[in-house]
């Protein structure tokens, strides 16, 4: 836990006291002040003014499109908004002299403003937000650094319900139970995994060699760290949101229990995956099908649209060639997974979900494990530079690559078994008891004290903080 975390805790504590003691009609104003204060805490003044300018341009686009609902004009503004995002996200910075400060939360703001523009294009005028509500929607301190990508309709509904909510309506025990788990994930578990990952990575950076086993451990350990860090942060944010009367969308649903590659992305970063599905995948696929009808054309369009969606999903994570490679690997896996799904539905005479025999179960677990392995290898750009990836790629053979996939898949299978046990325990009647939740909260507080004294200077930053 660092100084920033302590200041954030003070801000939230003070904010909660003020928030629930003002008139319900003034709660939006309190949220605006908290968001502005938090903004100056996480960014330099110059960056703050850049961010305000960034969202100001977005508001100008939405206001003009609201009053002039013409497709050509809206398409023009959508294109301009994408270009502005590409610039502020650092994709056009080819040299140090051309770099601009990469604005925190810029991609989450991109999705929120883009939804308003796309909804206005579809004639959904209720998506337009007046200035104060627009500011809260785009720069709410709860979701600025990490998401989730909240939808306009959900945000409007939450604001309308605020005036009828009170602090007594909150389920405090469940809230603090989840909050304590999230804090342990972020400040203890993810820290331990990250430290072990960095120790192993330093060995590679020193000797420039990695065995398939070591690479597999590096890839999967980072993936575990990413999950603990991101899902733990989501637990914290969603819990704090409930303290302010907000019900933020869930971002994770037991992703390591997924049965396939595509099922994993239905469970991981759910708000982003669903946004990409509703505002990219479905519209693109619909337009392609309109161009050419027919069963096989539809299948080919579906596979190619999966490729485009996951390619952009990978590239969204960073502006280096490492993330282009990540996007390509994810896109190929998504397309192949869709093809396998089509073969299952059209060629095989049995259905894996309906015929749970031992062979079907093993086959399904193999596909799930190889999917987790592939994803963990695809995101190596998070912990290796492009030059390091190229250098390592030159030193490995086809046999090494196959070995890496098999070893990582086996480790992913063990991970599945571990999460399956944890899931069964957490869903048991015992864990639903009030006394068990109270004991868990107390135990987690003890673990947090341990983390504070043992790892206070080693806690990694939130991975998605710069997005």
Image (tube, rainbow, N blue to C red):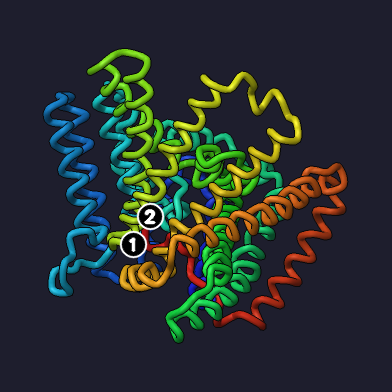
Where the C terminus falls, by quadrant? bottom left
User: In the rendered structure, are the residues bearing label 1 and label 2 in contact, judged by CB atoms less than 8 Å apart?
Assistant: yes
Q: Is any part of residue 34 visible from this angle?
A: no
Front one among 384 and 271: 384
Residue 311 percent across, percent down from the top left: 33, 46
Q: What element carries label 2?
A: helix
Residue at point 78%, 43% (across, down): 427
Which image quadrant is residue 393 in?
A: bottom left
Tell me if residue 380 comes above or below residue 202 in the rendering: above
Tell me if residue 106 comes above or below residue 261 in the rendering: below
Q: Is any part of residue 278 visible from this angle?
A: yes
Residue 148 percent across, percent down from the top left: 47, 47
Residue occupying the far top of the picture: 294
Tell me if residue 303 comes above or below residue 423 in the rendering: above
Q: Is mark 1 on a helix, strand or loop?
A: helix
Q: Mark 1 points at which residue?
A: 322
Front one among 280 and 184: 280
Q: Which label number is shown at residue 326?
A: 2
In this image, 275 relative to 118: left or right? Answer: right
In this image, 3 relative to 415: left or right? Answer: left
Distance Cα–Cα, label 1 vs label 2: 6 Å
Residue 225 percent across, percent down from the top left: 56, 64
Q: Residues within 10 Å of mark 1 (few under 14, many from 20)?
A: many
Residue at point 29%, 42% (across, down): 131
Residue at point 52%, 49% (across, down): 22
């Amino acid at each position: 836990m660092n100084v920033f975390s302590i200041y954030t805790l003070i801000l939230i504590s003070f904010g909660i006291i003020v928030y629930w003691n003002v008139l319900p009609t003034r709660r939006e104003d309190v949220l605006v002040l908290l968001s502005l204060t938090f903004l100056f805490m996480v960014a330099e003044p110059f960056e703050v003014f850049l961010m305000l300018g960034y969202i100001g341009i977005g508001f100008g686009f939405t206001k003009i499109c609201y009053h002039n609902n013409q497709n050509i004009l809206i398409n023009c503004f959508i294109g301009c908004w994408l270009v502005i995002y590409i610039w502020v996200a650092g994709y056009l910075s080819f040299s140090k002299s051309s770099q601009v400060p990469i604005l925190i939360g810029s991609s989450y703001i991109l999705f929120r403003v883009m939804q308003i523009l796309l909804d206005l294009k579809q004639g959904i005028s209720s998506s337009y937000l007046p200035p104060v509500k627009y500011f809260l929607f785009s720069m709410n301190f709860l979701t600025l650094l990490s998401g989730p990508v909240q939808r306009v309709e959900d945000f409007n509904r939450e604001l309308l319900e605020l005036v009828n909510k009170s602090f007594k309506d909150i389920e405090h025990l469940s809230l603090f139970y989840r909050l304590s788990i999230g804090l342990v994930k972020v400040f203890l578990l993810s820290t331990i995994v990250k430290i072990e990952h960095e120790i192993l990575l330093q060995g590679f950076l020193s000797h420039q060699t990695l065995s398939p086993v070591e690479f597999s451990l590096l890839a999967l350990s980072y993936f575990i760290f990413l999950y603990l860090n991101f899902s733990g942060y989501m637990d914290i944010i969603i819990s704090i949101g409930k303290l302010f009367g907000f019900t933020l969308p869930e971002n994770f649903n037991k992703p390591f229990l997924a049965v396939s590659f595509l099922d994993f992305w239905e469970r991981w970063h759910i708000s982003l995956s669903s946004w990409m599905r509703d505002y990219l995948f479905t519209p693109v696929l619909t337009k392609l099908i309109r161009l050419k009808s027919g069963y096989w054309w539809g299948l080919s369009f579906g596979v190619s649209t999966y490729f485009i969606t996951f390619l952009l999903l990978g590239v969204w994570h960073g502006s280096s060639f490492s993330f282009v490679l990540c996007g390509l690997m994810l896109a190929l896996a998504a397309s192949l997974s869709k093809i396998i799904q089509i073969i299952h539905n059209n060629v095989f005479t049995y259905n894996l979900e309906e015929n749970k025999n031992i062979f079907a179960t093993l086959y399904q677990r193999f596909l799930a494990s190889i999917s987790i392995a592939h994803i963990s290898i695809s995101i190596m750009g998070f912990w290796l530079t492009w030059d390091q990836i190229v250098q390592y790629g030159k030193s490995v053979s086809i046999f090494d690559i196959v070995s890496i996939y098999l070893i990582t898949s086996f480790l992913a299978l063990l991970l599945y078994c571990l999460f399956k046990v944890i899931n069964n325990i957490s869903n048991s009647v015992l864990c639903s008891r009030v006394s068990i939740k109270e004991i868990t909260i107390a135990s987690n507080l003890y673990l947090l004290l341990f983390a504070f004294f043992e790892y206070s200077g080693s806690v990694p930053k939130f991975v998605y903080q710069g997005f």
